[in-house]
Amino acid sequence: MITPEHGLLALPALRQLEQNAEAAGLQLMQHAAQAIAGWCQAHIPHGAAILVAAGPGNNGGDAILAACLLKQAGYAVEVLLPEPRVNAAVAAALQHWQALGGSVRPTLGDTPPAWLLDGLFGVGLSRPLGGAWLHLIRRLNSLPCPKLAIDIPSGLDAWTGQPRGIALRASHTLSLLCPKPGLYTAQGRDYCGHTSIALLDCPPTHYPQASGSIAVPQALALKRRHSSHKGSYGSVSVIGGARGMSGAAILAGRAALALGAGKVFVHTQDALLLDPATPELMLRSWQDGMNVPAANVMLIGPGLGLSDQAHQALDALLLHDNTLVLDADALNLLAADSQLQARLRQRSYPTLLTPHPSEAARLLDCSTEQIQADRIAAARQLAQQFACTVLLKGSGTLLASSGQPYRLLVHGSPALAVAGQGDLLGGAICALLAQGMPLLDGAHLAADLHACAGEHYETAQGGPIGLSASTTLQLMSHDLNQRLKQAGAPAF
Ligand SMILES: NC(=O)C1=CN([C@@H]2O[C@H](COP(=O)(O)OP(=O)(O)OC[C@H]3O[C@@H](n4cnc5c(N)ncnc54)[C@H](OP(=O)(O)O)[C@@H]3O)[C@@H](O)[C@H]2O)[C@@H](O)CC1
Ligand SMILES: [K+]
């Protein structure tokens, strides 16, 4: 059961929710206005000058009713109404505003306010913004003040996280009734700033079924018994590291160890004698063969290259009856060979693909821009087309598996946008799977630990530059131990 604060609704379900609430006599717009005014009173100094930009739909209605409450609370509020043709709810809100002595201006003045409230467009944006709206939002973006977006920054698509023509660049976003995927994925994080959700006291029974979720699985399944040994925590084999690329496979192996796998093998093209920083790794060459015990989780791809030998290794591994994670060049080999694709679809054992947007584009034979234009659709299409679970990397990482609600990560940081981080994530996922977590949950928890490591680093350093692999792994294993401490009893 996905709770209202975690559920991601499609537009028809959101409209259904609105109708359910209205039918039950809930005054959503009043609740929205109270939530917005409450947020402002908690964050904006008393009496400050607030410009409230109101659009022609209910997003504008929320904004104007909030303006009324803020004026009554002693703020110096002005309403900007660029479009005089408004819906009935906005007209009623305007009457209330004018009855309080509030004035309305059609264009932006010269004096910048202390804060801007953006209530131009919300989830009713139905086409790209053009003409006068482009000009206005450009001017609002250049105002030297913090900006609170109501529900979603105006112009940002609430489902894809992409601006439609242009979008307001908010410093904060207060989203109403439920989270929306566009707050977190694609360009959403850059446009929304700090986000919070106001559920508007809407009872959970009014919420239709969610198509996605932002809830992170618990670490409970990873609790350890005292009477356990390394054989209790599974083993991971990493297959990659073509000549000159062995570092990628080693990094994946280190991550698998750091996140708790019992034993880790790393198969590289040339046999390495030792990883001095992690002598626990068991190093093998491709010539030693890929025969590994049936309980293993296998990761193929980091630094694998596109050679015939690499192709043969992937071809053989797809026949193995154990959990398989495909990353990096394994995905590129897959994209170029329909026979490999057919073999993948025939697998009956858990299989995960972990593409970044360019790899996803190769797999779906489209452009990276097309993937990014609708990341949720792309992740779902990959999962369906290849009959497996998919983790689509990038800002707002997504997980999709046919017949399941999609998952969306709300954490992450540009600190992670450096070489080697994908290899670490692949190894970390395998570690949690080797310890018995189901595929979707294990991949999700590992990705969340990775995303949070980036955020923790950025917070601690005051910026995103310079995150190393070893720091990432320390942060991830520390976070995992904290989550274990908070989890309940061991899962016997
Ligand atoms: N959902 C909920 O349960 C709740 C919703 N609430 C609030 O309502 C908001 C949604 O309200 P909404 O549906 O009235 O849509 P909204 O975003 O105000 O815009 C519609 C207007 O914009 C216009 N328009 C659209 N695109 C345009 C374009 N490119 N260029 C120009 N015009 C364009 C469109 O015109 P039309 O397409 O009809 O020509 C119409 O006039 C939601 O975000 C939240 O704030 C809360 O009160 C609590 C519960
Ligand atoms: K808005």
Image (tube, rainbow, N blue to C red):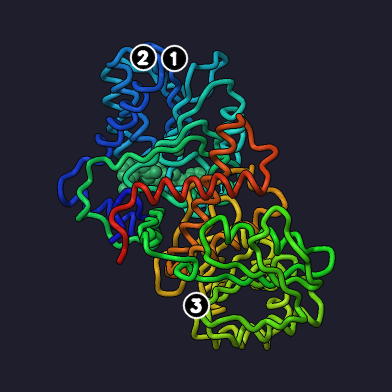
Identify the residue position indicated by label 1 in the image: 49
Identify the residue position indicated by label 3 in the image: 350
Residue 241 on image: x %, y %: 76, 67
Between residue 188 and residue 486, name the one nearer to us.
486
Residue 180 on image: x %, y %: 42, 50
What is the number of the mark on residue 75? 2
User: Pointer 2: residues within 10 angstroms few (<14), some, or many (20+)?
Assistant: many
Amino acid type, mark 1 = Ala
Position of 237 relative to 13 (above/below): below
Position of 398 relative to 180 (above/below): below
- Disc 1 to disc 3, how far (Cα)? 57 Å
Quadrant of residue 378 in the image?
Answer: bottom right
Q: Residue at x 56, y 59 (%)?
A: 428
Q: Residue at x 39, y 51 (%)?
A: 484
User: Pointer 1: residues within 10 angstroms few (<14), some, or many (20+)?
Assistant: some
Quadrant of residue 38 in the image?
Answer: top left
Q: Residue at x 43, y 25 (%)?
A: 52
Mark 1 residue CB less than 8 A from any atom of ligand 2:
no
Query: Element at badge 2?
Result: loop
